[in-house]
Amino acid sequence: MSEFTYDLIIIGGGISGLTLACGLRRSGLRVAVIEAQSEQAVDERPRAYALAPLSAKIFRSLGLWEHIAPAISHFSQVVLSDADHPNRVLFTPTDLGSFAGLADFGKPATYYCAEHRVLQGVLRQQASTDPHLYCYYNARVQTVNYGARQAEVLVETEQGQRRLRASLVVAADGANSRIRQQAGIKTDGWNYWQSCITAFVSPTQSHQDIAHEHFWPDGPFAILPLPDNRCQIVWIAPHEMAKALIELPRDDFVAAMQERYGEHSGSLTLLSDPLVFPARLMHSRRYCQPRLALIGDASHHCHPVAGQGLNLGIRDAAMLTQVLSSAMQQQQDLGDIRILQHYGRRRRFENWVMLLFTDMLNRTFSNHWFPIVVLRRWVLRLMVRFSLLRRLMLRLMTGFWGTQPNQLAHMPMMEVTNPEPDRSETVTLASSPKSQEGIQS
């Protein structure tokens, strides 16, 4: 069995895990990323995400934005509406005010939309530029043992078993995280009465880079514009209704979708098979313990309304990057619980606020109860009339109300002074590896 020593092991090679890995480029830390699927399978997930301006700011600070921005859409407006009520709330770049720093991004935008393949491809390519970072694909974690001075991860790869050691393990392996479950970290939450249908479509007329969040009593219907006049639709419906819609013949499904989409962009062409998954809310009771930290969907999962899920994971990765960078500069143990709690306490509170926000937003608009209908439409009228309310709402949705990881762009490079560390000890600060797979014992 081959044995390798790293400073940090990230389990999960999706967007959150690779954002953390890219945040630690040029730090000198030896980082291993373990992904159960192949590179192709991870890259080709047929999904697109609403990307908040704060996420764009994070990617820019990591030197990634110049590679991402040309391949994604920049929303000139986001339109929020309630069923057939005439009042529509229009969010524009001016509603972001000074929160977004729009001048830094060139083209003004309220929000962005990026396909999974674009984000994943840029992150994977940029991660490959650091010789201290190695990705294991088609690799399955068998066991994780947490010791007093290091964690040990047993991995089954195509080349055989590997025993990897590191000061810290980061679980970025999704909502059903085996690492979280094996560590005994409990979660709270519930399953919603709704499912989410996603599909790519193309309208005959230009979508004009305008996004829509149209609420209906059985669930919201979102339109996310993409380059080449394509859109992703996110259709929330009760489970039975969603199941029936998916089973419709293709033409009947498009006709039903057209009713929700509206006629503002002409008729629709379905570009992909629709996918469906249940909506749920999940929140871990803690984000860290000695030698372990959780990020992304491994620590939280929210309702799809308002497109918050991926953005929360990106903020997790950015905050943990800051915490680990600070610990590295002070030559502290990366897996020390006192270090990790700086990340866990702050992100758990801010994510809890956003999970509560998405839950309340969905429950407020996804019902027929007359007093709630009157209340929400009264609030919409106020938002149309008063720009301050729109700015407060947009600040909450875009993440600018919470902690902003402003120090990422200033993360120092580490001077390598000892290329041959004592292999019997846990290495807190990295040295130049002998091979692409770290320091082999």
Image (cartoon, helix red, strand yellow):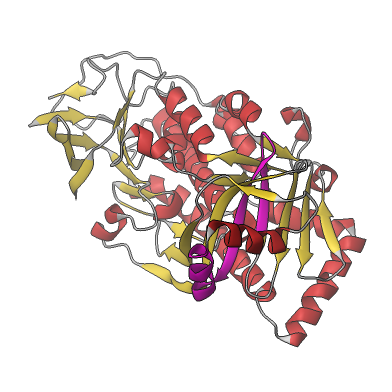
Return the residue nearer the eye: 213 or 293: 213
Is 41 magenta? The answer is no
Q: Is residue 127 left or right of residue 349?
A: left
Location of residue 106 by image quarter: top right
Q: Is the residue 27 above or below the residue 232 in the image?
A: above
Q: Residue 439 at what x, y percent from top left? A: 20, 22
Is 247 magenta? The answer is yes
Query: Which segment is the magenta one?
Result: 222-248
Return the residue nearer the eye: 119 or 254: 254
Location of residue 339 by image quarter: top left
* Residue 326 in sight here: no
Classify the position of the N terminus by image quarter: top left
Q: Is residue 431 left or right of residue 208?
A: left
Q: Residue 27 at what x, y percent from top left? A: 42, 24
Residue at position x 85%, y 74% in the image:
378
Residue at position x 42%, y 36% in the image:
43
Return the residue nearer the eye: 166 or 427: 166
Q: Residue 169 at what x, y percent from top left? A: 30, 43
Q: Residue 383 at what x, y percent from top left? A: 85, 63
Q: Is the residue 337 above or below the residue 321 in the image?
A: below
* Residue 430 in sight here: yes
Q: Is residue 144 left or right of residue 346?
A: left
